[in-house]
Amino acid sequence: MQYLIIRSKMNRNIDNYRILILDFGSQYSQLLARRIREIGVYCKLWDWNITVEQIQEFNPNGIILSGGPESTIQKKSPRAPEYVFTAGVPVLGVCYGMQTMAMQLGGYVKKSEKSEFGYAQVNIIAKSKMFHDIRDSEKKDGTPVLDVWMSHNDIVTEIPSDFIVIASTDNCPYAIIANEEKKFYGIQFHPEVTHTRQGQRILKRFILEICGCKALWNPANIIDDAIWSLRKQVGTDSVILGLSGGIDSAVTALLLDLAIGKRLICVFVDNGLLRLNEGQQVTEMFGEKLGLNIIHVKAAKRFLKALAGITNPEDKRQTIGRVFIEIFNEEASKIPQVKWLAQGTIYSDVIESATSKTGKARVIKSHHNVGGLPKKMKLGLIEPLKNLFKDEVRKLDIELGQPYNMQNLHPFPGPGLGVRILGEIKEEYCNILRHADAIFIEELHKANLYNTVSQAFTVFLPIRSVGVMGDNRTYDWVVSLRAVETTDFMTAHWARLPYDFLGCVSNRIINEVTGISRVVYDISSKPPATIEWE
Ligand code: XMP
């Protein structure tokens, strides 16, 4: 693989400039973090009850206090550590973050007579370094106006004595407040949502000018930095990686390939639950075209044997995960020089597992990945993507020449077709499903609909229905088509695919796939359904 590594002094330590976001539980906290990364600066989300030592160790150039669902008026509602205001770095409080900042520094907050949700106009009434030149329009008297998005029940009614008011709305006298000397700013609206039209400019001003950060966090620098760090971490050892063909493990493999070349050993386990020709595509792309070191384990029979008779979805997942680990262990133990295990963990996995540790999230499905491996194998863990959001991983993929092609952007679950065949998994069902699914996906591409949906696939239902083909009665299986639109896969709408398109797919499947007599379309959203059927 060709990728020119230019490691200049300029881009070394691209996370030297860093912003700390204290999370008070807003639904937009992750979005805030992504917006800052988009500006080109490294940032990390941390629970509001971070310790002073943790802040000092992180050593941020600026701190943002996020919004949150609670009310500062309530007893025991969360507060920022006092150290935030003595650390000597700029602070930006957003919504709840502004209210707690105002309160902690001597101001008052009370329940607003009128809650404000949605669009609002903010009038800028005083000059400030943070907002000069930033406006959407002007009033007749020349007052600059911002179009913003608000979402709050409480308002600041008195500001700390060393603060000034910069802007207000009709309903909210303190919409923007500041202590310019200390570089403390409070804004009642949400700059991270696109409805606040100047939101990104405001964040940029705060981060690049007020905090003095340099925008070094971009795909080329991230790759360069990852290669350098991987070389430092691994030294002359070898690394093993479970390659699934998904984008996270693919980008992890490509970075390691650039860093250590043939000392990366990829294990690709064909569990018999892959899509049509997928095993061949992965080995051709990564092995033959890109020249990665791949061990292709053909283990379909072993998985099917282990899965025989199992109908419960969770038991199926556990079995698939267990057999995968067994095979991976066997392969790893054949290569004694391997000292490290690489995984494609990304930042949202880290945030989500932190949430599940605190018990805030309930396990709906145990998502299978190779998380159980290191303890057993006593290998060091390498996770080069663990600070990146999914969209950043996609940008890295593009920067690396997009070898993991655009054809395959929809996610595919670890247990593969195992969660798309309801009940017991049989080889016959896998073959039928693979064929039907390939037709659905092919037609989506042909109709230019593939990129309009976030995920599309076919589900095998082990029930028989009567049909008629020519003059003969048939009594065959049913499949369901599923297509959803979502941004985060936590909630999803069923995709309104055109009837004619669905009709064409159904026709092709019933005519071309032996064993299917009926095709249905799933019109359930998440929640209450989930995206996969099991
Ligand atoms: P659900 O069905 O939970 O799916 O609404 C949300 C997203 O997660 C994918 N998914 C999985 N991914 N291992 C994975 O790597 C799994 O076990 C798994 N189960 C679901 C699913 O395809 C969808 O994109």
Image (cartoon, helix red, strand yellow):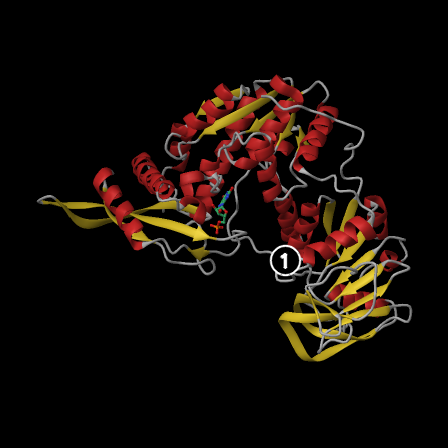
Drawn side of residue 208 relative to residue 264, left or right:
right
Drawn side of residue 298 relative to residue 430, left or right:
right
What is the total number of numbered labels drawn onto the structure image?
1
Instruction: Report x, y in % for residue 398.
Output: 57, 34
- Which element type, helix, strand or loop, lies under badge 1? loop
Instruction: Report x, y in % for residue 345.
Output: 61, 39
Where is residue 344, by image quadrant?
A: top right
Q: Disc 1 designates what residue?
A: 360
Identify the residue at image location x=47%, y=60%.
527
Where the N terminus falls, by quadrant? top right
Residue sitting farthest toward the left: 471
Q: Is residue 79 visible?
A: no
Instruction: Report x, y in % for residue 514.
Output: 22, 38
Residues packed near mark 1 inside 10 Å, few (<14), some (14 to 19) or many (20 plus): few
Q: Amino acid at mark 1?
A: Lys
Between residues 220 and 315, which one lies in front from this camera angle? 220
Between residues 376 and 70, which one lies in front from this camera angle? 70
Identify the residue at image location x=43%, y=52%.
484
In this view, 353 is above or below 105: above
